[in-house]
Image (spheres, rainbow, N blue to C red):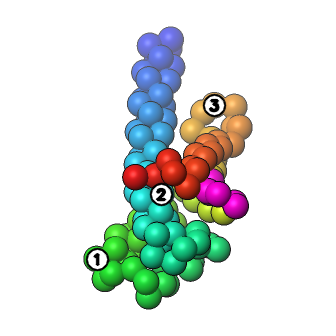
Amino acid sequence: MFTVVFALELVRAVSERARDVQANDVCSKLAIEIKYFQIQNGRFPHSLSELQSTDSLGEADKNVVQELMAFAQHNKWHDTYDYVPSTNGFTLVVTGPSAGWLGKGRRMEKHYNAEDVR
């Protein structure tokens, strides 16, 4: 019995690590596109929807943003991605249900200053 519980916990830990890597990757890519928007428009977008629908991005960048948003809305962990603009930067917040046994929800915040994203 102990072996089964240990194996299940190991699988959960590996899945949680994959979830973290994927969330960090999506946040990094979104941060680059948000910074590009800021360079083109002189301000950060008001929302991820504005980023996705803007005409200031080239067609290739618009496709990247649409793919990122599609993943963010339909990822296998049911995480949600939110964007919070601020005066000199922004925060990307990833929330989702727990992958653990105790059922506590998951939350990750990535803060970016205007000069951080390159």
Q: Is residue 110 visible?
A: yes
The picture places residue 12, in percent across and down from the top left corner, at 48, 31
Residue 90 located within the stretch drawn in magenta? yes
Horizontal side of 63 relative to 50 (left or right) equals left
Labels 2 & 1 near each other (Cβ < 8 A): no
Among numbered discs 1 and 3, the one appearing first in the sequence:
1
Q: Is residue 30 visible?
A: no
Q: CA distance from mark 2 to mark 1?
A: 16 Å
The picture places residue 90, in percent across and down from the top left corner, at 62, 57
Q: Look at the numbered disc 1 and give the secondary structure of its residue.
A: helix
Q: Residues within 10 Å of mark 2 (few under 14, many from 20)?
A: many
Mark 1 lies on residue: 60
Identify the residue at horizontal 31%, vertical 83% (top origin).
59
Nearer the observer, 74 or 21: 21
Nearer to us of marks 3 and 2 is: 2
Q: Residues within 10 Å of mark 1 (few under 14, many from 20)?
A: few
The picture places residue 10, in percent across and down from the top left corner, at 44, 23
The outermost residue toward the left is: 60
- Kind of residue indicated by mark 2: Ala
The picture places residue 75, in percent across and down from the top left corner, at 46, 58
- Kind of residue indicated by mark 1: Ala
- Kind of residue indicated by mark 3: Trp
Among numbered discs 2 and 1, the one appearing first in the sequence:
2
Quarter of the figure with residue 105? top right
Mark 3 lies on residue: 101
Tell me which segment is drawn in magenta: 86-91
Labels 3 & 2 near each other (Cβ < 8 A): no
Which labelled disc corresponds to residue 31?
2
Horizontal side of 117 relative to 90 (left or right) equals left
Nearer to us of marks 1 and 3 is: 1
Q: CA distance from mark 3 to mark 2?
A: 32 Å
The outermost residue toward the top is: 2
